């Protein structure tokens, strides 16, 4: 019986975003130059299950705003997965946007993440098995995340206007830097209306106090006006809570992004062996004139100190 050995793919993954007037490539060869395939390694007997490498190429139409042409593009998605038949250890994904003359306008690629495109931004979802869900939100002109989010994304919109903003909470990584700075986590904010961003850093007052706080912080938005409502969505597998400010309907002013609180619930003294000592501290951050506390941040970010 003839044996086949797996073809090893060497891939350099990158996160690349192009400006509005830039063509990624004027060659049309990239449009249909690749083929899907599957390879099974029947030679390597070091594993109970055979090793497999799968390359899959699909095409669909995406609506994207703010690029050179469009808003409709042909999206070519290339995924490469490697592992055994039950678990893929490596995942590479690339999305390329072409105009209808087959010119490549935009390209983005990630490793061990999944890409989801929306009309005004895209999201990279972490594929690691660690819960909870973690993802990052980017706009199409930058290659750095503008929202980092654990579990749920929050959006705030004013109906019949251009005002649309996003909030997300990311817990601090368990690193030596986190231990030195006593950071518990951060709230990230991004406005699609004017590109404004800010970060609210949640930290404890000392290393000793830091040990008492849980990093599993619950963040949500709470309206102050009874006309404004919160709804849950799950579009393209992205969990999102949407606060709609019906009381501001039709107003295209960023300063009207107000009359709601960013609420953080932080666990203190959490101990499963002694649950009677467990406390939940609630911190409210009012949004006034489109800003937390109605003020511009000092040194580029806001800070909330817990004792």
Image (cartoon, rainbow, N blue to C red):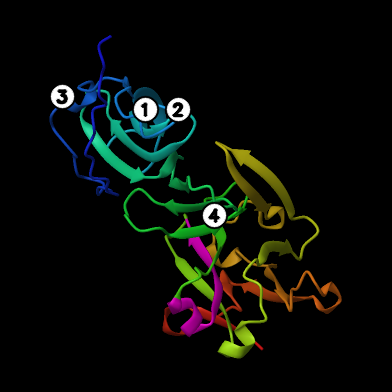
Q: Quadrant of residue 275?
A: bottom right
**Disc number lying in front (4 or 1):** 1
**Disc number lying in front (4 or 2):** 2
> Quick one: label 4 or label 2, which is nearer the N terminus?
2
**Disc number lying in front (3 or 2):** 2
At 28% from the left edge and 35% from the top edge, which residue is drawn?
69
Q: Are marks 3 and 2 in contact (CB under 8 Å)?
A: no
Q: Which mark is residue 29?
A: 3
Decide: is 29 above or below 221: above
Q: Quadrant of residue 82?
A: top left
Residue 71 visible in the shown view: no
Q: Nearer the viewer, residue 119 or 143?
A: 143
Decide: is 193 above or below 100: below
Disc 4 on helix, strand or loop? loop
At 30% from the left edge and 33% from the top edge, which residue is drawn?
97
Taking the image as shown, residue 55 lies to the left or right of residue 178, namely left
Q: Which residues are magenta?
A: 176-191
Q: Nearer the viewer, residue 146 or 72?
A: 146
* Pointer 1 residue: 52
Q: Quadrant of residue 78?
A: top left
CA–CA distance between discs 4 and 1?
47 Å
Relative image position of residue 207 (x, y in whole percent)? 56, 88
* Pointer 2 residue: 85
Relative image position of residue 121 (x, y in whole percent)? 43, 47
Disc 1 on helix, strand or loop? strand
């Amino acid at each position: 019986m003839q044996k086949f050995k797996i073809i090893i793919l060497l891939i350099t993954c990158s996160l690349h975003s192009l400006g509005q007037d830039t063509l990624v490539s004027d060659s049309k060869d990239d449009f249909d130059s690749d083929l899907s395939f599957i390879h099974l390694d029947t030679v390597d007997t070091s594993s109970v299950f055979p090793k497999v490498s799968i390359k899959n190429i699909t095409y669909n139409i995406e609506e994207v705003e703010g690029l050179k042409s469009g808003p409709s593009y042909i999206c070519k998605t290339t995924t490469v997965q490697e592992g055994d038949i039950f678990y893929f250890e490596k995942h590479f994904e690339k999305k390329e946007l072409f105009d209808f003359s087959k010119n490549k306008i935009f390209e983005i690629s990630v490793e061990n993440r999944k890409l989801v495109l929306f009309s005004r931004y895209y999201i990279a979802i972490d594929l690691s098995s660690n819960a909870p869900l973690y993802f990052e939100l980017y706009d199409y002109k930058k290659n750095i995340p503008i929202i980092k989010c654990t579990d749920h994304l929050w959006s705030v919109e004013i109906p019949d206007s251009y005002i649309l903003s996003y909030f997300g909470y990311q817990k601090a990584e368990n690193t030596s830097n986190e231990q030195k700075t006593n950071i518990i986590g951060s709230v990230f904010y991004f406005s699609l209306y004017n590109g404004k961003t800010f970060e609210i850093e949640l930290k404890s007052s000392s290393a000793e106090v830091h040990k008492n706080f849980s990093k599993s912080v619950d963040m949500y938005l709470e309206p102050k006006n009874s006309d404004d409502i919160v709804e849950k969505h799950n579009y393209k597998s992205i969990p999102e809570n949407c606060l709609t400010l019906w009381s501001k309907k039709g107003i295209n002013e960023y300063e009207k992004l107000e009359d709601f609180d960013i609420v953080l619930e932080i666990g203190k003294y959490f101990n499963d062996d002694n649950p009677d000592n467990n406390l939940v501290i609630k911190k409210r951050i009012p949004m006034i004139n489109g800003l937390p506390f109605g003020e511009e941040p000092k040194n580029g970010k806001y800070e909330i100190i817990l004792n």
